[in-house]
Amino acid sequence: MNSRTLSGLFVILALPFPLLASLGGDTTSVQADQAKMQGSRLTTSSDSFTVHEIQASTGIAVKEYVSPAGKVFAVTWQGPAHPDLRQLLGTYFDQYSQAVQAQRAHRHGHGPLLIQLPGLVVQSAGHPRSFLGRAYVPQMLPAGVRVEDLR
Amino acid sequence: MNRALQRGFFFLGLAGVLAATVGCGGGSSGTTNTGGGGNTGSGSPVSNVQSITVNTGPTAGAPYNNPYVDGAFTSVTVCVPGSTSNCQTISGILVDTGSSGLRILSSALTISLPQQTGSNGNPVVECFPFVDGVTWGPVATTDMTIAGEKAKSLPIQVIGSSSFPIVPQGCTSNGPPEEDLANLGANGILGVGTFAQDCGSACTTSGGSNPGVYYECPSSGCAVTTESISSQVPNPVILFASDNNGVLIQLPSVSGAETTVTGSLIFGIGTQSNNALGSATVYTIDPSSGNFTTVYNGISYTDSSFIDSGSNGIYFLDSNTTGFPACADASYWYCPSSTQNLSATNKGSNGATGSVSFVVGNADTLTANLSDAAVNGLAGPDPGTIDWGLPFFFGRAVFTSIEGQDTPAGAGPFWAY
């Protein structure tokens, strides 16, 4: 994260209970999705967005980026396993799965995923026991937020 | 883990194997042989050289018409445990240093292998997560032979078995299944990476810290289970009687796009005259992630790069960082207007550093003729990380050592080249 984004960040709270929202969802969906990942949560805010960082018991770290309008516009993850992508991508999951299968027909082999659809970008990298990834909805990025800031 | 302990675990694992069988897809016509080469006894080194070929793979022809680019294929012989006649040699197996464990498509198996059962007596079925999808299917046991090396009573995964056709939601939440030849692009995957088992200690734990790789499947349905280290699908190399501390892959240099190249998968590190480390630099890696560090353009990507023969290109960073545009028709590949000669520095946890020269070509041009299976310069974006895929192996001799296994350069895991 660059220093421009970092300035103005402050820790609001560290909660012992889990939280998980879905890409494109709003913060009220956060409550409904609780208890999926058993871990701790850290929330930080800047002018452009709020980040909910969840450290799951599986060792996977998930970050959810919430816009000032209260929408989850991006999620990132890193850890020894994949996160629950069905949960994390929400209504975008089926679109993602179909795009992955379509890419297989053209890719001529295995490798990291870079799904680039008009309304959805998903990047999935790494290898067994070390995965990382990022998903966002380009149209939902708040003004001034760069993709590189989402990590 | 020392070998005596391994053996002990391994026999405990056997107790869980019942007479139920899996496999027998029957779709392909594998050849049967009578056991293959073998160890001629103590003191006499076994043949440890297996030929590998970078070719268009088993999906090149109809009805798939999807030739593989930058995949190294080989064959393995699998037998019903204890049998030297009920065997099958299967070709089109992808050599993968990015994962551990042997996985074979059910459709490629013509023999029936015994199903592994769990502590409750039910079949054990695995959901193994790769970066681009999951493989779902039962854990079976086989005696595997490759070159002169044998892994007896080896747990493997049989992918896409009709006995367990429904992939649980908890499994597909990792990504879409790769259950058939069209989706896998290979008859199987030979994982000879840095990990001794495919999952490791996390899968031995119950509750929230279990990553959900192993399932037990009674007729009422599948549920995540714990799986002991000895029952897990291991890197088959650790079960060899000798040459069991890692592998050496040798492939010739490739200039641009070539039809095919042939090289060697050599078992053992410093165990025979043909696998000495020699002047290779040893880069130790982070034992939990299996990564080391790469510096590119002055920026260090700490513990987030890796060497992976199972990736079909060099995948690194993004267009903003590298300055190379993605291909217009393929966001997953770079398409610079001219071939770029680049360099990066790899760093081991042991402080070893070394410069790596590599090439990024125009993927559209390089893949214009899909009868060319060996392509140097195939590369694409991989934000935040550097995946040294198969082109890294062209013109290099690359050692992949296994965690906990001793070598003349110390215990693994490390890469050396």
Image: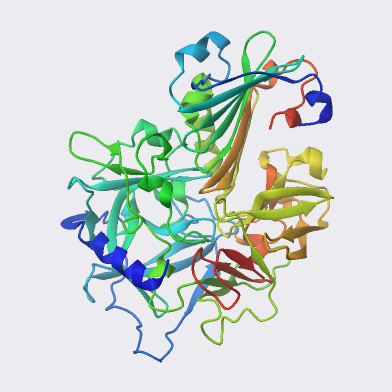
Q: Which residue occupies 62% across, 12% down?
A: A71
Q: Which residue occupies 73% across, 52% down?
A: B365
**Residue in the foreground of this view, choosing between B282 and B341:** B282
- Give the image location of residue A39, x and y in percent: 49, 28
- Give the image location of residue B98, x and y in percent: 54, 56
Q: Is B157 placed above or below A10 here?
A: below
Left or right side of B278 for A100: left
Left or right side of B324 for B276: left
- Give the image location of residue B256, x and y in percent: 73, 63
**Residue in the foreground of this view, choosing between B183 and A46:** A46
- Give the image location of residue A5, x and y in percent: 79, 24
**Residue in the foreground of this view, choosing between B278 and B19:** B278
Q: Is A40 placed above or below B12 here?
A: above
Q: Is B261 placed above or below B159 here?
A: below
Residue A123 visible: no
Left or right side of B184 for B167: left
Q: Quadrant of the C terminus of chain B?
A: bottom right
**Residue in the foreground of this view, choosing between B34 and A77:** A77
Q: Which residue occupies 30% across, 42% down?
A: B225
Residue B79 visible: yes
Q: Quadrant of the N terminus of chain B?
A: bottom left
| Rendered image quadrant of residue A65 | top right
